[in-house]
Amino acid sequence: AQKITQTQPGMFVQEKEAVTLDCTYDTSDPSYGLFWYKQPSSGEMIFLIYQGSYDQQNATEGRYSLNFQKARKSANLVISASQLGDSAMYFCAMRDLGGSEKLVFGKGTKLTVNP
Amino acid sequence: SAVISQKPSRDICQRGTSLTIQCQVDSQVTMMFWYRQQPGQSLTLIATANQGSEATYESGFVIDKFPISRPNLTFSTLTVSNMSPEDSSIYLCSVHNREETQYFGPGTRLLVL
């Protein structure tokens, strides 16, 4: 069964600094995808970045990058040059690509950006 | 990308009543998913809805409590039946049209009194 672990309930960062949000995963499927979402207080789930298990390079999307270490089963999200608007809940999720199609989520990390 | 809308955006309901949530997507998708997010918690999948077949429910969720319709490739409904305060949650519709994407609707905030 798939499992996502986010060990940081809350993180604080100063504006304009970089921050890393941790995510480890467990799956027996050799083919899977890893996702990060941002959920502001409004409740919407905003898709940030995707990493496929067979992708050779780490995914990047603007200020977001994914530090993918397959052997360690980790997929940490790095946010560079933090902005006040980055304050939100961040969820890591995964889907086994050869399986049920469902997305399994971690418990989330609450990020607070301080001015 | 896919644009997803949900109705209602929020509601306050009395216990014992039912609420039907609608999800509309701007493109045809094979699979639609319904998630629940209880207060302060992560997202949990309720069921997967395929057009033309019965929905597939996850462990802990049953059709009598959460009946789902999927009449076409762009629309689905989730009904929360015989509500209790424990059903107070955000309910989110989700779709994916490619392996590397999964999009969510804006959610329906439900409060049951």
Image: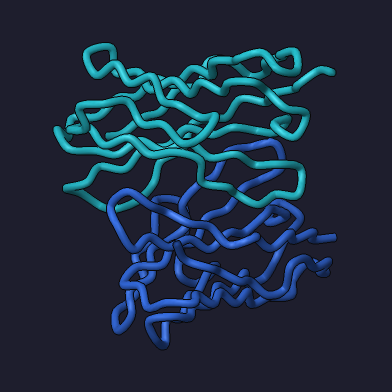
User: Picture quarter containing residue B78?
Assistant: bottom right
Q: Where A61 falls versus B67 (above or below)?
A: above
How many numbered markers are drawn? 0
Q: Nearer the viewer, residue A114 or A70?
A: A114
Q: Position of residue B96 (x, y in %)?
A: 37, 60
Q: Position of residue A102 (x, y in %)?
A: 35, 51
The residue under the point 25% across, 42% down is: A96
Where the C terminus of chain A falls, by quadrant? top right
Where the N terminus of chain A falls, by quadrant? top left
Q: Position of residue A25 (x, y in %)?
A: 35, 24
Q: Which chain is blue?
A: B
The residue under the point 69% across, 53% down is: B89
Hue used for the chain lettered A: cyan
The residue under the point 39% across, 50% down is: B59
Q: Position of residue A101 (x, y in %)?
A: 29, 53
Q: Where A10 falls versus B78 (above or below)?
A: above
Q: Nearer the viewer, residue A90 or B45?
A: A90
Q: Is residue B16 left or right of residue A53?
A: right
Query: What colour-coding does the image apply?
Result: by chain
Q: Nearer the viewer, residue A8 or A49?
A: A49
Q: Where A23 falls versus B25 (above or below)?
A: above
Residue at the far bottom in the pictured view: B71
User: Picture quarter containing residue B83?
Assistant: bottom right
The residue under the point 47% across, 66% down is: B2
Q: Is residue A70 left or right of residue A38?
A: left
